[in-house]
Image (tube, rainbow, N blue to C red):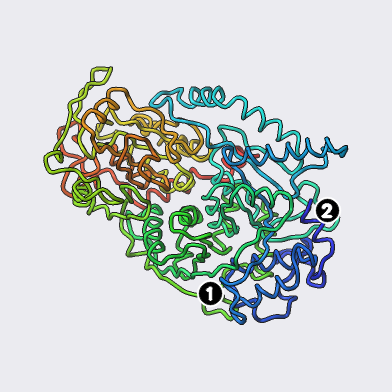
Amino acid sequence: FNQTLVMSGGLYSSCRTSLRSSKSGASLGSYYSLHSLNDDRVWALPYSIRVLLESAIRNADGSLVTKDDVEKILSYYSGNTAGNVEVPFIPARVVLQDFTGVPAVVDLAAMRDAVAALGGNPQKVNPLVPVDLVVDHSVQVDVYNDPKAVEKNKAIEMSRNKERFQFIKWGSKAFQNFRVVPPGAGIVHQVNLEYLARVVVNSADEEGGDKSAPVLYPDSCVGTDSHTTMIDGLGVAGWGVGGIEAEAAMLGQPIAMVLPLVVGFHLSRELGVGVTATDLVLTVVEMLRKKKVVGKFVEFYGPGVAKLSLADRATVANMGPEYGATMGFFPIDDVTLDYLTQTGRSDKHVELCRSYAKENGFFLVPETDAKAPRYDDTISLDLSTVVPCLSGPKRPHDRVALHQMPSDWKQCLSAPVGFKGFGLKPEHLDDQIEVTLGGGEKFTLKHGSIVIAAITSCTNTSNPEVMVASGLVAKAAVKKGLKMPAHIKTSLAPGSNVVTDYLIEANLLKPLEALGFGVVGYGCTTCIGNSGELDPAVTEAITSKDLVSCSVLSGNRNFEGRVHPLTRGNYLASPPLVVAYALAGRVDIDFEKEPIGTATDGSPVFLRDIWPDNQLIKQTVAKVNTPAKYRATYL
């Protein structure tokens, strides 16, 4: 186990000290103390940079990591090294998804063959840091609106990927420090958030770790998926890397990176009534794209941070690649610790995380505190100014306020071909076609008609509040007698089985299923383009009239052609808005003035009639989202 080998000695062994519980006083292990550096420069560093510093002093051996590397980090401000020098970073672990992770396992197998050919012991070739591979990118929405959709889609997935899955299973048994989360468990980033992440690592708990002299250190990870950044919402430094970098990290080699500039993102007040975490992250994406934060860390601070749930933070952190940052980091605080308890982590581990973070300078302090960090640049947002919104039709940072959707869509249709235009000529703006499905249902398709509506992606399915909100919208809609247009391909693909469990307990899964949003599988699905085929009649109608048809999804990317080849307009939206737009059947609806549909008594039903109260959402989540569900799912 590489971390233990390095931590058994090193250039900064004098910084290694004992940690005792802040509650009981019991010894929890030893750690490399930033205080022991006796250097005031430490406390000006952003929390995310302190993670790099701790890793450097813990792993400093004069070869992979040197004293000069440590000094570069300490000179972040005083020596103007930020953005100008290269430093090594050894992450605590590596996370892989099945598409990009398989090549790494292939290379490990090839190394074993090479060692065997040279007369060595191939069993010695193993990852030197913990590696988790989550199979989540292979499931597709082939079957939907079917009570057996999960089982049928999983059977198709297993059939399509039999050889790959057999190889992955072999790897899980052949290599040490290598675990596989099998198909059907969830999405890698949500599983990482709810189960894999440690926040603080105890080396004694890791495979091959020294149980007699445990060392504690901040959890961190790199992953072969760009949205590895989601874990930053938990105070765990993580980001996406290429396959070569991931393999190097697996083999205990440091990742060489330019010491990043850090932009501080100040949050104040709190989100208003009817505003979701999805609305927040789409606003943040728009702001930070304009700020130009590519290659930088973004770190959130200010009184508004405490007003965000951990799930809200994870939603914001998830879309780091969309706003261009390497990380969108939320430091550890009480909300972090409460989430660990909420998701079934042990009281002992939560206490370890609390004691370590507070003792070693990783626990968020008020911005007025003497040990509060400085930032190279700052940006601010009053959370109360965030409004309901979507992003599209072709890029995640093209935010559109909900009330502006009708006019924005109209402009997009006739605007020149580009990110905000489809270049339709005036004589084709009103093109439409009558379609009859195989079951005899008749409907009209036109520009802006929705043909795919998907509650998908870890971005939102990891957030109990928006998931419960979608169920409450569905429940209210069903009660009023609203029906889903038959031509829309609807799906629900949670990022973990916990979501299904709490939706069932809240009596919200059945109304979602009644509108076609039944569970189709546990994986990325529509968010990565695994949306499956449309009804043949719908496909024929779109192609024959060259219609600009649309999708609405709770994902993180909406580039043209990504969701489905035939949906040229694609809008990112919160799960409850996905349900609402699907019921309306078109993206150009004015929810303030136009009804979504007609109730069984003939009265018009508006969005405001079925949108849930914030208090009801919170009460429902508090009742059904329990630690026992996470323990039952993961342990």
Residue 170 in picture, x, y percent from top left: 71, 31
Query: Disc 2 marks which amino acid?
Result: Asp
Residue placed most toward the observer, 437 or 515: 437
Residue placed most toward the observer, 99 or 309: 99
Residue position for label 1: 366
Is residue 62 depicted above or below 74 in this figure? above
Residue position for label 2: 210
Q: Name the residue furthest left.
A: 427
Query: Could you tell me which residue is drawn at 53 percent across and 59 percent down?
Result: 326
Left or right placement of residue 622 versus residue 415 in this view: right
Left or right placement of residue 59 versus residue 354 in this view: right
Q: Can residue 20 be spotted in the picture?
A: no
Is residue 41 depicted above or below 110 in this figure? below
Residue placed most toward the observer, 551 or 479: 551
Q: Secondary structure at mark 2?
A: loop
Q: Name the residue furthest right.
A: 119
- Quadrant where the C terminus sits is top right
Could you tell me how far apart the alpha carbons at marks 2 and 1 are, in whole angstroms? 36 Å
Query: Could you tell me which residue is drawn at 65 percent across and 65 percent down?
Result: 52
Residue 265 in picture, x, y percent from top left: 46, 68
Query: Could you tell me which residue is drawn at 43 percent across and 68 percent down?
Result: 267
Query: Disc 1 marks which amino acid?
Result: Pro
Please report whichever mark, 2 or 1, sits nearer to the chain's N-terminal start.
2
Counting labels gives: 2
- Hey, which quadrant is residue 12 in on the image? bottom right
Left or right placement of residue 283 versus residue 36 in this view: left
